[in-house]
Image (cartoon, rainbow, N blue to C red):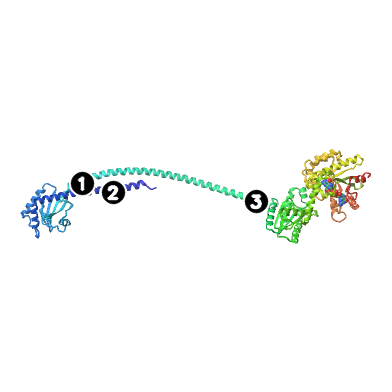
């Protein structure tokens, strides 16, 4: 730090010392000048005295000596007299000597005779005086060696004649030692006073400055401390900011990731990773906006519900993933592949307007399902139905296009599955018809349009009637007699199946009881149940209620369930136990068309298997169906199931089944399903 007091003390000391020296010198100069002027005026006054007293002789002397080579020494009486007179006049005063020089600078008279004849023409003082001016010099002389020095003022004063002209020069030496001594004494005194005053001043300033310096130093220290704390705080704050910044950018990163993830999820199907419905719709809307021709291929798996119901949703999901992968591989030419949900996929071809080209693509998709899907060591055979719809030909909005593609897909399914269909406007009419059908079916129960038909089941060996299956018929004034294949799926989809199912069960039981009352004891009545009925909470209670209400002997009742229906329900054994306890028989309908594992079959609460008609119809045709029937029979024997064969139409089929030990037969060979009256008429007297 700048040392104020050091610099100040040095500088102010120097300045004060300088001021003191200058003051002293100034004072001395002033005093000397005054003394000189005073002494000079005394000398001039003395000259006046000398002139008043000795003007004439002096002028004579001066004039008389002009032109002389050498002055006569001592013997000049007048000169001695003059000298005596001058000495007398100056006696006792401070005048040490008086000399008079003539115009040529020669000393013509002097109080000290040794000076006589001295030459002064070259001296500046002399010449000045000759020009009429008075000049003085201060001198210090040593009168004798070792004697104290004397200060004197030497004045040269013009010597004038009466007419005022200068004819010579007076030289007067006046002793000013006393004055100089006093002056020196005064100077010392003044020096002392000045030293004291300036010293005091210096000291006061020094103290003040030192104090100021201390204050400044303290302030500087305070400032440094403050700066240090500030720096520390700034450092800490900076670190904190860096931390906050880091955390913020981390949060921003995370948020961005989440947003990306959300965006991904919003546009992708979580299960298969394909685009989802929303992404697909957005994309198609864009394409429509660009007026591109488009082909939309709506893909629906045919047996997927069965896979899901029988093998569980886990396997179902795996199948969907495998299907998605297969589609991506085979339909690599597709511009977009998406999963709309469930087992519905969709494929978009942009710029396609040629029917052949699109048909080729749709055919490839159908063919992609020809090979089985390998999952967990099992091979799954699936097929897909594809509906094709084109923009702008078949629709101009996404909604329209999707609806029409869906309609075409339904047509492909209705036409036997595993194929594709192009949308045609007439299909929409079909769909409209479907909705008409649904509306009519809703009113069917209330309007008493439902009937049951009965089909006999006979003992294989004896041909005796052992029971009958109740099959639902819908007699509509406009539609005529509608078969269950046409309306049961619709009833299942719309939930109407609950009302229909209950009606059939009630009607079948009522019919059996009624016949018993008139003496016709039907040994057993089979009623079909849909999977959806089983899934409905309170289903068993409803059945129990109907049993109680109609008063049927529960042992006469047999319920037919499909494999998929049984497997769709968790803990089905437990659920159906109350019915089993009452003696109700449970049969597995359409056996062989599902996916039941043997282990699972063993655990099911059924007592009867119904071999599906499709196998029976293959008997004698070398289709491998006989081998299947043989296997089923083996299985049934080992698990002690009774077996009913469905759809038996020929005696040959009956013989084949009998040979394998099939206990019961059902089919046109022994009678088709007929109205109750016809059934009664045919079987009442039968033994
Ligand atoms: P299902 O339970 O397997 O019924 C047997 C079907 O085979 C009946 O068709 C029957 O008429 C037919 N059938 C019987 N013998 C022969 C034959 O020798 N040859 C041929 N070709 N067919 C024969 P239906 O009555 O059209 O019923 C079809 C399906 O509708 C039934 O198959 C059953 O799954 C369902 N269904 C019928 N009524 C009901 C019902 O009340 N509730 C439920 N949930 N489903 C029902
Ligand atoms: Mg059946
Ligand atoms: Mg069946």
Q: Residue 442: which quarter of the image?
A: top right
**According to the image, label 1 marks what residue?**
183
Q: Residue 31 in the image: x percent, y percent?
A: 21, 48
**According to the image, label 3 marks what residue?**
263
CB-based contact (under 8 Å), mark 3 and mark 2: no
Q: Residue 38 in the image: x percent, y percent?
A: 17, 48
Specify few, some or many for label 2: CA neighbours under 10 Å numbering under 14, 14-19, or 20 or more: few
Which one is nearer the viewer's eye here, 658 or 304? 304
Q: Is residue 467 left or right of residue 258?
A: right
C-alpha gap between disc 1 and disc 2: 20 Å
Identify the secondary structure beneath mark 3.
helix
CB-based contact (under 8 Å), mark 1 and mark 2: no
Task: Confirm whether residue 628 shows in the render.
Answer: yes
**According to the image, label 2 marks what residue?**
18
Which one is nearer the viewer's eye here, 98 or 7? 98
- Among numbered discs 1 and 2, the one appearing first in the sequence: 2
């Amino acid at each position: 730090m700048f040392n104020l007091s050091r610099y100040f003390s040095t500088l102010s000391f120097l300045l004060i010392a300088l001021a003191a020296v200058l003051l002293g010198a100034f004072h001395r100069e002033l005093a000397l000048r005054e003394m000189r002027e005073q002494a000079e005026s005394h000398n001039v006054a003395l000259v006046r005295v000398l002139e008043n007293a000795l003007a004439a002789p002096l002028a004579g002397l001066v004039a008389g000596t002009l032109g002389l080579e050498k002055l006569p020494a001592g013997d000049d009486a007048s000169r001695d007299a003059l000298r005596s007179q001058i000495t007398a006049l100056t006696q006792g005063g401070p005048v040490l000597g008086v000399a008079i020089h003539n115009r040529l600078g020669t000393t013509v008279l002097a109080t000290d005779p040794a000076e006589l004849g001295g030459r002064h023409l070259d001296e500046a003082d002399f010449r000045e005086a000759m020009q009429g001016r008075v000049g003085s010099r201060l001198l210090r002389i040593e009168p004798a060696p070792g004697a104290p020095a004397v200060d004197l003022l030497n004045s040269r004063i013009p010597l004038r004649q009466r007419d005022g002209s200068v004819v010579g020069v007076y030289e007067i030496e006046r002793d000013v030692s006393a004055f100089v001594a006093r002056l020196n004494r005064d100077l010392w005194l003044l020096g002392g006073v000045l030293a004291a005053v300036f010293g005091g001043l210096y000291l006061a300033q020094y103290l003040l400055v030192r104090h100021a310096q201390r204050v400044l130093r303290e302030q500087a220290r305070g400032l440094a401390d403050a700066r240090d704390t500030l720096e520390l705080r700034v450092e800490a704050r900076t670190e904190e900011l860096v931390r906050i910044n880091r955390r913020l950018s981390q949060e921003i990163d995370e948020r961005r990731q989440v947003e990306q993830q959300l965006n991904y999820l919003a546009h992708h199907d979580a299960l298969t990773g394909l685009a989802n419905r929303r992404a697909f719709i957005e994309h198609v809307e864009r394409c429509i906006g660009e007026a591109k021709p488009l082909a939309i291929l709506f893909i629906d798996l045919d047996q997927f519900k069965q896979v899901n119901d029988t093998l569980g949703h886990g396997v179902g999901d795996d199948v969907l993933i495998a299907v998605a992968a297969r589609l991506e591989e085979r339909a690599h030419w597709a511009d977009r592949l998406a999963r709309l949900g469930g087992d519905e996929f969709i494929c978009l071809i942009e710029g396609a307007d040629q029917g052949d080209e699109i048909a080729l693509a749709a055919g490839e998709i159908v063919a992609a399902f020809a090979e089985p899907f390998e999952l967990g060591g099992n091979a799954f055979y699936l097929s897909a139905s594809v509906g094709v719809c084109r923009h702008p030909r078949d629709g101009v909005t996404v909604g329209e296009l999707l609806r029409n593609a869906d309609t075409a897909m339904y047509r492909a399914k209705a036409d036997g599955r595993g194929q594709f269909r192009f949308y045609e406007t007439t299909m929409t009419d079909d769909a409209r018809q479907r909705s008409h059908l649904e509306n009519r079916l809703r009113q069917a129960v209330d309007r008493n349009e439902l009937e049951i038909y009965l089909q006999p089941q006979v003992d294989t060996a004896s041909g005796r009637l052992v029971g009958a299956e109740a099959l639902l018929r819908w007699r509509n004034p406009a539609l005529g007699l509608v078969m269950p294949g046409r309306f049961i799926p619709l009833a299942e989809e719309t939930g109407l199946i609950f009302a229909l199912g209950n009606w059939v069960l009630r009607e079948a039981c009522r019919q059996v009881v009624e016949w018993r009352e008139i003496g016709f004891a039907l040994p057993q009545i089979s009623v079909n149940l849909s999977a959806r009925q089983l899934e409905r909470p309170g289903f068993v209670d409803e059945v129990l209620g109907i049993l109680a209400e109609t008063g049927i002997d529960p042992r006469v009742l047999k319920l037919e369930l499909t494999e998929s229906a049984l497997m769709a329900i968790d803990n089905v054994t437990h659920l159906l136990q109350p019915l089993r306890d009452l003696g109700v028989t449970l049969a597995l309908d359409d056996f062989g068309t599902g996916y039941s594992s043997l282990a699972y079959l063993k655990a099911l609460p059924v007592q009867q298997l119904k071999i599906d008609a499709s196998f029976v119809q293959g008997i004698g045709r070398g289709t491998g169906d006989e081998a299947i029937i043989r296997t089923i029979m083996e299985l049934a024997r080992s698990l002690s199931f009774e077996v009913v064969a469905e759809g038996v139409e020929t005696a040959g089929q009956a013989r084949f089944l009998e040979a394998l030990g099939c206990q019961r037969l059902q089919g046109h060979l022994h009678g088709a399903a007929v109205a109750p009256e016809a059934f009664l008429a045919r079987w009442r007297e039968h033994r």
